[in-house]
Amino acid sequence: MSTGLWVTLTYRDADAALTWLKAVGFTERAVYRDDTDPAVVQHAELTWPDGGGVMLGTHRPRPRWPDQVGTGSAYAVTDDVDSTYAAALAAGGSGLQEPADQDYGGRSCVVRDPEGNLWSFGSYRGEA
C-alpha cells in the first residue's frame, strides 16, 4: 500500500483523466464505477512511482460542496522531469513552464492537464 500525500480531484471526463495520468507515469490501482452508469467513475486511485498518488472521480454536483473541476494543483517528484514533461504534452497537456533548473535546487516544469488542473513535476525532494 502506498503511503504519504494523496491529491484528490474531480473530472468531467474521468476516463480521459485516467488515460492522461497513466501516460504521465501514474499506475492505476483501483477504479470503481457506478453500477447504473459505468461511464461514471465513483472512485479511482493511481499511485505515483515515488510514493503517494491521486484519487479522482467523475464530477457530480453536490450540495454544500464547491465546484472544483479544473482548479486543483499538485507537485510530483520525478528523477526524469524532461521525459515526464514530454509525456504530459504528448498526452494532451499544455505546457506552462518548460523544464528548467531552479535556484533552490532541482529541475521542474509545470503542465495544465486537459481539464485545467496544474501539475508540477520536479526533481526537488524538499529540504533534508
Image: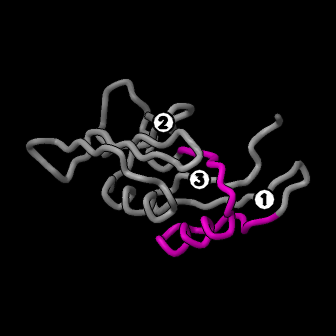
Magenta stretch: residue 73 in it? yes
Give the answer, above or below, for where 88 lies relative to 47: below
Q: Check if residue 110 falls in the magenta segment.
A: no
Instruction: Tell me, for residue 118, which label it has, or none.
Output: 3
Q: Is residue 65 above or below residue 113?
A: above
Q: Mark 2 and mark 3 in contact (Cβ < 8 Å)?
A: no
**Which circle's residue, 3 or 2, is located before the other in the chain?**
2
Task: State which tag comes first along the sequence, 2 or 1.
Answer: 2
The quarter of the image holding the N terminus is top left
Instruction: Determine which quarter of the picture holds residue 30.
Output: top left
Q: Residue at horizontal 53%, vertical 46%?
A: 71
In space, the residues marked 1 and 3 are separated at their CA atoms by 17 Å
x and y percent of residue 39 in the render? 19, 53
Amino acid at pointer 3: Leu
Range of magenta residues: 72-100
Residue 7's disc number: none
Callout 1: few (<14), some (14-19), or many (20+) C-alpha neighbours within 10 Å?
many
Q: Which residue is mark 2?
A: 2
- Give percent across and percent down for residue 115: 45, 57
At label 2, counting other C-alpha atoms closer than 10 Å, the crowd grade (few under 14, some 14-19, many 20 or more) is some
Alpha carbons under labels 2 and 1: distance apart = 25 Å
Q: Is residue 2 above or below residue 38?
A: above
* 66 shown above or below 107: above
Q: List the residue tagged with mark 1.
A: 107
User: Circle 1 — which element?
Assistant: strand
Q: Secondary structure at mark 2?
A: loop
Quick one: 8 or 126, which is closer to the camera? 126
Most extreme residue toward the left is 36
Q: Which amino acid lies under the numbered mark 1 shown in the image of this protein?
A: Arg
- The amino acid pointed to by label 2 is Ser
Q: Are marks 2 and 1 in contact (CB under 8 Å)?
A: no
Q: Of label 1 and label 3, which has the lower sequence position?
A: 1
